[in-house]
Amino acid sequence: MAHFDIQISAHASLPPDGAKLTVVSGYTFFFFCPQGEILDWDRSVEIYNDLKANKVDDVKVMANHTVFSGGKVNEYRLWDLGDPGFATGAVLAGQDEAIVSLAGVTADKPATLSELLANTVVALDADKPGNTFNIFFNACRST
């Protein structure tokens, strides 16, 4: 069994069709602003830097909302931050490069949260029974 702390570092919007995902066993999602709000830039940078420094426990306490297995999360649309100072996509805690990058992905043709997560699990070769994942959603939760 392995554990993975993964930051979703991207721009995000709600799915236009209201689609939701059921959080599967072994996954926990951490959100940093209420649904429908824009994540404050300074707070986002603090989250990003703390996860880059692998300060996972410090970031967990910053969460505004946590969703455990069996809960529902929106099928967010995700795209490139467009800021060379920050990795965009799925980033492991303790690192500053994306495992799966969203570089070049636009708001007009965004990736979905489930696509990014599936590609990340494949890239990590982590699709094994008993593996656990903390997903830190460092993105806006608005339309």
Image: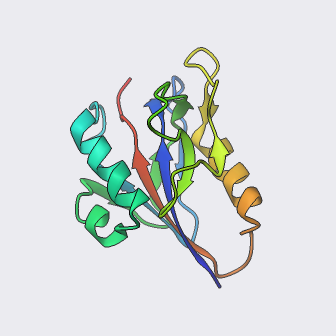
The quarter in which the C terminus is drawn is top left
Q: Answer with left or right where residue 44 lies relative to residue 23.
A: left
Can you give x and y, in whole percent of width and height, for residue 136 in the image? Answer: 42, 55
Quarter holding residue 108:
top right
- Residue extending farthest to the bottom is 1
**107 relative to 12 in the view: left or right:** right
Q: Which of 29 and 93 is in front in this view?
A: 93
Residue 39 versus residue 130 in the image, above or below: above
- Residue 122: quadrant of the picture: bottom right
Residue 100 screen position, x and y as percent:
66, 46
Say which residue appears at 70% left-offset and 60% top-offset. 121
Q: Which residue is drawn at 27% across and 49% down?
A: 46
Asked if residue 94 is positioned above or below residue 18 in the image, the reply reads below
In the picture, measured across the screen, residue 78 lies left or right of residue 31, that is: right
Point 30% across, 65% down: residue: 60
Vertical side of 122 occupied by 43: above or below = above
Q: Considering depth in this image, is 7 or 52 the residue closer to the camera?
A: 52
In the visual, does 16 lie left or right of 2? left
The N terminus - image quarter: bottom right
Q: Position of residue 82 (x, y in %)?
A: 50, 24
- Asked if one can make out residue 33 in the rendered structure from this viewpoint, the answer is no
Q: In which quarter of the image is residue 132?
A: bottom right
Q: Which of 59 and 27 is in front in this view?
A: 59
Location of residue 38 with respect to 28 vertically, above or below: above
Query: How was this image coloured?
Result: rainbow
